[in-house]
Image: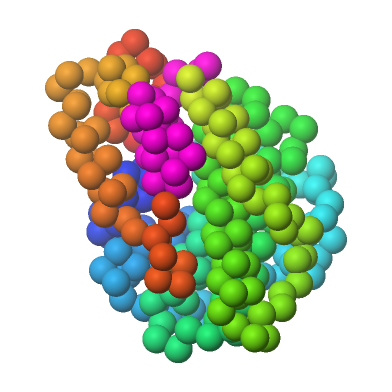
Amino acid sequence: SSFYLLLHEFENAAEIANGINTTQYGYFFKPIGTLHEDLANRELALNQHKIFDSSERDLDLLSILSSDNVHEINHNRGMFPQSAETLSDRGIEAVRAALCSTEIRNLELQSNHNADTVRKQIQYCQAGLAHLNQSLGQKDANNHERLKNHMMCLYQRCHLLCWHHKLFLLLQDNFEDGEINDTLEIRGTEIDSARKSLEECRELSETHQYPFMQLLVGKSLIKLGFDISGGEELIQHALQCIEPSDSEVANSILSRMDDVHVNVGGHTLSLFKPTPCQRGMPSAA
């Protein structure tokens, strides 16, 4: 399911994850498995332009904003989050951040889009960023075992920062009661920070030869308008690291990425076996 989520094959992701929440078998990784099932079902609904019901399961995504962890990094985490980051492409904080992103997009689909709606979207942006900071702030966050999670956190942080910037502008320019609490104290720094996150992700993906991540970064550079020619070059470089027989698969992934449109206030935010790049495939494969 984790693998298919990364490839934007949401029907397969939802089908494989179906039943994790209801199983009576208590295994160590069930907490992240249940979140994967929620994420897969939500992504599938959003991909079909359907609104999902957030009240079906309380995921407690916003509670981090009222905790000490909103400004402090917990360096005494238990074995579970550490193991999840080692064995999966996305640890539990990255999955929670992805769930925050689905809440933002779900609210965007609702017809009653007012100042309170935008404030709620900004809260989910801030919560997602706070979850990611807990993973990115670990002393060994970018070691070899956790590198894929680290890159995914950087990639997600870039997009959440851009949403935060756009939503703040939307609230400020379109609503008289457009005040919001800058909980993370990042107002005005989002775009520079987003660029830095994406650049770090790019450097790591090139240094350690992860063509799949290079595809994600390249698409982001283009869609966000940071560096269109640089994004195109990075995508071409990644495709050269992939076996010719898998080029069609790679291009279909790029096409599915194009089909995922994220809007803020009506404005769009602008698998395979690699050779010789030996670490290109998401580990869930």
For the view shown, which residue lies furthest in the front direction?
Answer: 173
Looking at the image, which is closer to me, 24 or 96? 96
Give the quadrant of the C terminus: top left
Looking at the image, which is closer to me, 56 or 129? 129
Report the magenta stretch's main SS: helix
Residue 227 vs residue 64: left or right? left
Percent coordinates x, y for residue 40 in the rendering: 38, 60
Residue 75: tell me if it is visible. Answer: yes
| Vertical arrangement, residue 45 with respect to residue 239, above or below | below
Name the residue located 71 percent from the left edge and 70 percent from the top edge: 63
| Vertical arrangement, residue 183 with respect to residue 231, above or below | below
**Residue 64 lies in magenta, yes or no?**
no
Name the residue located 65 percent from the left edge and 86 percent from the top edge: 176
Looking at the image, which is closer to me, 213 or 14? 213
Residue 140 vs residue 153: left or right? right
Residue 150 vs residue 280: left or right? right
Name the residue located 66 percent from the left edge and 80 percent from the top edge: 178
Name the residue located 21 percent from the left edge and 35 percent from the top edge: 251
Task: Indicate the quadrant where residue 150 lies.
Answer: top right
Percent coordinates x, y for residue 48 in the rendering: 26, 68
Percent coordinates x, y for residue 162 in the rendering: 55, 54
Residue 21: tell me if it is visible. Answer: no
- The residue segment tinted magenta is 207-234
Percent coordinates x, y for residue 28 in the rendering: 57, 50
| Visual colour scheme | rainbow
Residue 207 vs residue 14: left or right? right
| Vertical arrangement, residue 55 with respect to residue 173, above or below | below
Looking at the image, which is closer to me, 275 or 204? 204
